[in-house]
Amino acid sequence: MWRSGAVLLHALVAVIFGMVVAASSSALADDPKAGRKKAAKCQVCHGYDGIGKNPEVPHIAGESEIYLIRQLRAFRSGSRQHPQMSIIAKGLSDRDITDLAAYYGALKLTVEVPEF
């Protein structure tokens, strides 16, 4: 009797743990729609389209979300320095960063190879 009760208890704990993990990860899912709204801070240099507006600003449209998250976190922590980005990134939460990365990462670029 004790053994079956312990097995049932472990199963119940596993199910509850799984539900908590699923709920928390969906609550933290990247939101490109929210990222688009947050991109207002970024549009001066990177635009809503993710294309740098002057030669010194990188294009970030279609860039890997993982790369964008790493770079924004590096600017925020100070391990990567840039006069404007270091200031801007300091005010970003983890959620802001993942939402922005989801938005700019979701932008699609097309490439046309010229005929030679």
Image (spheres, rainbow, N blue to C red):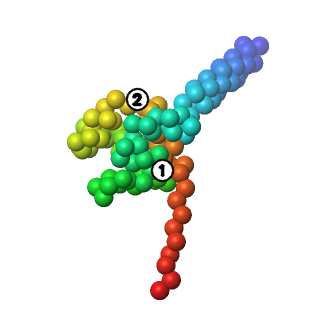
> Tag 1's secondary structure?
loop
Residue 64 seen from this side: no
Which numbered marker is on residue 36? none
Residue 4 pos. (x, y %) = 75, 18
- Compared to residue 76, the image places residue 54 above or below, namely below
Q: Is residue 20 above or below residue 98?
A: above
| Kind of residue sitting beneath label 1 | Asp
Residue at x 66%, y 25% (from the top left corner)? 19
Which circle's residue, 1 or 2, is located before the other in the chain?
A: 1
Q: Position of residue 85 (x, y in %)?
A: 29, 41
The residue that disc 1 covers is: 49
For disc 2, the marked residue is 93
The quadrant in which residue 16 appears is top right
Q: Nearer the viewer, residue 37 or 98?
A: 37
Decide: few, some or many residues near mark 2? Use Cα within 10 Å; few <14, some 14-19, many ≥20: few
At horizontal 50% and vertical 75% (from top left) the residue drawn is 113
CA gap, disc 1 to disc 2? Answer: 22 Å
Tell me if residue 4 comes above or below residue 37 in the rendering: above
Q: Nearer the viewer's eye, disc 1 or disc 2?
A: 1
Looking at the image, can residue 50 be seen?
A: yes
Q: Is residue 84 left or right of residue 38?
A: left
Amino acid type, residue under disc 2 in the picture? Ser
- CB within 8 Å, label 1 to label 2: no
